[in-house]
Every structure is written in structure tokens, then in C-alpha cells.
């Protein structure tokens, strides 16, 4: 029984080795957390944990997509063709799912739109997670730095300017 469990765990990482998958997931959590930290400090409805979870989920979709691309589902099931996993469909699915979450955060109160920046930062954390899952860690890190500057530094400049 243990041999079957070990074989299943080892065999399920045909494209992305387990250590690489773990590193990508952890980096997605860290980079998403960096963005979420600012939202948490600003007491927004989607903070640290939400941004981390969105980024991890997006990363996981891409890693799973890479794994699935190596499996011939139809042949294994007795079919004669090959099922291909389209990475663009995975990206579209993540984008649509995160957009749904972000839209739930944005609301109108007293004729003013609220939390649109938090919704946008959630959407961006989805993209950061996708980049991590695809192994584009430097790109994900660059995006994290840029969004942190936009949300944190420029946000403070806007707040100071509006209080004048």
C-alpha cells in the first residue's frame, strides 16, 4: 500500500518537479502577500490573506495545467485522440474568476465607487500567481515591486494631495 502511495506522489509530477512546484507556490504566496500587506494596512476588505490566496490559486492553475499537458486523457480512456490543455484557457479562467471576486469587493456608496484599487490589486495578484506558476519569477517580482509602488507610494501622494 505504501509503495502505491509513494508511486502516486512521485508519478504525479511529470512536468514540474515537486520542489519547483513548491517554490513557485511559495513565491506566489509571498509576492501576493506583499501586495496584500498594503491593502491590509489600509484596512481594505481584501487584505493579506485574500491576495495571497488569489496568487497561490492562480499559480496552482498554471502548474496543474503544465502537468495536465503531459497526460493523454483520451488514449488512457480508450479514445483514439489526444486532449490538449490550452494555457490561454487557463489564464482566461483565472482572470474571469478573479474578476468575479474583485467585482464583489467594489461597491457604490453615496454616489461614490469604493474599493476599486483593491479589486484591481486582486486582479493583479492573479497575474502574479500565473507568472509564478509559469516559472516567470523575475517577471512576477518586477510586477510586485511596481504594484507596491503604485498602491503604496502613489496612494500616499494622492491622499496628501486630496487633504490640501
Image: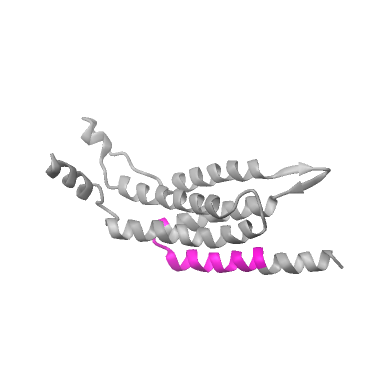
Q: Quadrant of the C terminus?
A: bottom right
* Residue nearer the viewer, 40 or 82: 40
* Residue nearer the viewer, 5 or 43: 43
Look at the magenta stretch and give its main secondary structure: helix
Magenta-tinted stretch: 133-152
Q: Quadrant of residue 36?
A: bottom right
Q: Can residue 143 be found in the magenta stretch?
A: yes
Task: Name the image colouring.
Answer: one colour
Q: Is residue 5 visible?
A: yes
The answer to whether residue 32 is above or below residue 107 is: below
What residue do we see at 43% from left, 59% from top?
132
What residue do we see at 48% from left, 48% from top?
91
The answer to whether residue 162 is above or below residue 100 is: below
What residue do we see at 52% from left, 55% from top?
127
Image location of residue 24, percent across then percent down = 38, 59
Count every numbered label the image shows and give the total. 0
* Residue nearer the viewer, 46 or 41: 41
Q: Can residue 153 be found in the magenta stretch?
A: no
Q: Quadrant of the N terminus?
A: top left
Image location of residue 95, percent across then percent down = 53, 47
* Residue nearer the viewer, 68 or 4: 4
| In the image: residue 82, left or right of residue 91 | left
Image location of residue 93, percent across then percent down = 49, 43
| In the image: residue 82, left or right of residue 135 | left
Image location of residue 161, percent across then percent down = 82, 68
What residue do we see at 16% from left, 46% from top?
7
| In the image: residue 145, left or right of residue 9 | right
Q: Is residue 134 visible?
A: no
- Looking at the image, the residue that sits furthest to the right is 164
Amino acid at each position: 500500500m505504501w509503495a502505491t502511495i509513494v508511486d502516486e506522489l512521485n508519478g504525479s509530477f511529470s512536468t514540474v518537479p515537486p520542489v519547483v512546484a513548491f517554490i513557485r507556490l511559495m513565491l506566489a504566496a509571498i509576492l501576493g502577500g506583499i501586495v496584500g500587506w498594503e491593502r491590509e494596512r489600509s484596512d481594505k476588505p481584501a487584505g493579506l490573506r485574500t491576495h495571497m490566496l488569489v496568487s497561490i490559486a492562480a499559480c496552482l492553475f498554471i502548474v496543474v495545467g503544465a502537468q495536465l499537458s503531459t497526460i493523454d486523457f483520451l488514449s488512457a480512456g480508450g479514445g483514439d485522440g489526444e486532449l490538449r490543455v490550452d494555457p490561454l484557457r487557463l489564464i482566461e479562467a483565472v482572470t474571469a474568476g478573479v474578476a468575479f471576486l474583485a467585482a464583489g469587493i467594489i461597491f457604490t456608496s453615496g454616489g461614490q465607487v469604493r474599493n476599486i484599487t483593491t479589486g484591481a490589486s486582486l486582479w493583479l495578484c492573479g497575474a502574479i500567481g500565473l507568472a509564478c506558476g509559469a516559472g516567470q519569477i523575475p517577471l512576477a517580482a518586477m510586477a510586485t515591486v511596481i504594484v507596491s509602488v503604485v498602491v503604496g507610494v502613489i496612494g500616499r501622494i494622492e491622499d496628501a494631495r486630496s487633504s490640501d
